[in-house]
Amino acid sequence: MEDVFSQGDELGPLKVIHVQEPSIGLKATLVIDNVALGPSVGGVRMAADVSTVECARLARAMTLKNAAAGLNHGGGKAVLYGDPKMPLDKKEQLIRGMACALREAEQYIFAPDMGTDEECMAWVKDEIGRVVGLPCEIGGIPLDQVGATGWGLSHVTEIAAKHIGMELDGARLVVQGFGAVGKNTARFLKEKGVVLVATADSKGTIYNENGLDIAELLELKKEGKSVIESKSGKVLEAEKIIDVECDVWVPAARPDIITEKNMQRLKTRLVVEGANIPITYGAEKYLHEKGILCIPDFIANAGGVICAATEYQGKCEKEAFVAIEEKLRANSSLVLEKSSQEKVLPRDAAVAFAVQRVKKAMGYKRWGLF
Ligand code: NAD
């Protein structure tokens, strides 16, 4: 078993809980990283190849994201081993089993992540009640449908553009990944005059230097088709999205997309990270030195978790959107200010202020971690 405690530090992890029930093929891990700010929130990731180490990394990312967003929640994450596309009745059994096995882990609030959705959260609610990201019929705010994370990214982009003296009206946008995060970012930025010149999904890239038809792209996605079926642009390979010249580049697909191997190819002025860990630290450093501003993931994409926390307080979608806008505009301004003043990467500035908040909260406790 991987030893995540030896890789831990003064912030955590507080608890690592493994559960299994061989009779139904259930195997899952929960990492509660830090609860100094309140009960931890973080999604349940379901995939065949998850690991305890991945779970611990993601739990720490949630500690920082929740702290930076000013939420009264600590960070946690759970992983469930299995193919998320398995027959639904089997998946339901695993999710319900996992929820029951973790019934006593009261410092963790379940939420959706890759491989799980609001229906899965409804099963968790039915079993143990401690969950966010529910279907709207039972009090949830469907955060992917309403575009909570994209809404936040559009505000962060506006603040960052202002910081580098870039006019958003007419700015060229490239979005990698046209899913819940990517498509809503494009949709909200269009309202600010931004022109989407290229986007990609796993099938390929679609490109038009004069602008793509976002309404058509949204319709294609609704029908379960790829963006490359759009008639508004030229089709390129998926990977070519990195080479398209633009003013704003938004990764909204997978981790580790820009690395030391391909970082020279980006031709943009601003990167706003929609996906989690889409750019390696070394590549972010290189881009910073080249004068390309990168807004780190846990600052830029916190709209989803702010929406979830708002739902947990029993508030509505409108209140979630107001909270996302206020918090992310203030946070991105703060990070940019600190980064300029202290001449450090925006990520380093952001980590420093998130850690400071967690440590301050830990200081009010008899023991720091619990
Ligand atoms: P999604 O599954 O709805 O969309 C992902 C998109 O990426 C799809 O269009 C898919 O085809 C595309 N894609 C996959 N591989 C690709 C590739 N190699 N090249 C180009 N496109 C590719 O997922 P999502 O919810 O939009 O999440 C996207 C990323 O943002 C993930 O890293 C996720 O962890 C992160 N994130 C999501 C939220 C949220 O609110 N959903 C919040 C914070 C962070």
Image: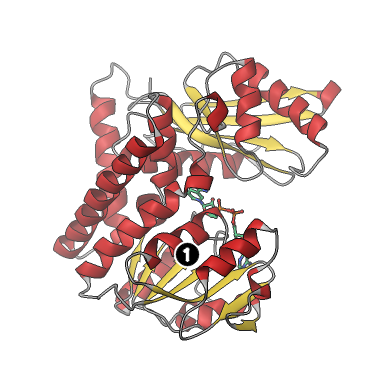
- Residue plotted at (23% across, 31% down): 360
Left or right side of 61 for 328: left
Q: Residue at x 33, y 75 (%)?
A: 292
On the image, which quarter does residue 361 sit in?
top left
Q: How many other residues sit within 10 Å of disc 1, few (<14), some (14-19) or many (≥20)?
A: many
Q: Which residue is mark 1?
A: 279
Look at the numbered disc 1 and say if its residue's Cβ is closer than 8 Å to ligand 1: no
Quarter of the figure with residue 269: bottom left
Q: Quadrant of ligand 1?
A: bottom right
Q: Is residue 283 above or below residue 89?
A: below
Give the x, y percent position of residue 252.
51, 61
Q: Position of residue 135 (x, y in %)?
A: 57, 32
For this orientation, the residue located farthest to the left is: 341
Q: Is residue 85 visible?
A: yes
Q: Residue lying furthest top in this view?
A: 104
Residue 258, compared with residue 188, is above or below; it is: below
Return the residue nearer the eye: 370 or 250.
Answer: 250
As helix, strand or loop, the secondary structure at mark 1 comes to loop
Which of the pair 291/4 is nearer the observer? 291
Instruction: Please say whether residue 258 is visible from this viewpoint.
Output: no
Q: Identify the image quadrant of the C terminus.
A: top left
What amino acid type should be assigned to the residue bearing mark 1?
Answer: Ile
Name the spot of residue 209 as percent of width and height, x first. Answer: 47, 86
